Amino acid sequence: MEQKPTQLHWRKSTRCHDPDGDCVEVAITDSTVSLRNSTERGRELSITVEAWHQFLQALRSGEFDRP
């Protein structure tokens, strides 16, 4: 059963060191990964787990690195 947004377990990025707490938060279920800004919790982006894995692979391979 898919979790309702109020039941999601949100985790803040371990790379967040902003003293104001303006960071990325992620909540993962069996089928989706939801992302939000920790200071704008009403707005979320949800993608499939497969899309999340593809995004992470692209990050790790340097696909988004600046020249």
Image (cartoon, helix red, strand yellow):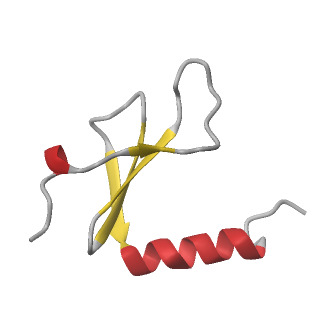
Where's residue 13, x and y in %? 54, 45
In-image side of 42 versus 25 (left or right): left
In-image side of 41 versus 17 (left or right): left
- Going 78% across and 71% down the picture, which residue do you hit? 62
Residue 67, compared with residue 39, is above or below; it is below
Residue 67, compared with residue 11, is above or below; it is below
Q: Quadrant of the C terminus?
A: bottom right
Most foreground residue, 32 or 43: 32
- Going 54% across and 79% down the picture, which residue do you hit? 54
Where's residue 30, x and y in %? 26, 73
- Going 73% across and 66% down the picture, which residue do you hit? 64
In-image side of 53 versus 1 (left or right): right
Seen from this angle, which residue lies furthest top? 20
Q: Residue 50: which quarter of the image?
A: bottom left
Seen from this angle, which residue lies furthest right? 67
Where's residue 51, x and y in %? 45, 76
Most foreground residue, 65 or 53: 53
Most foreground residue, 16 or 44: 16
Residue 24, compared with residue 56, is above or below; it is above
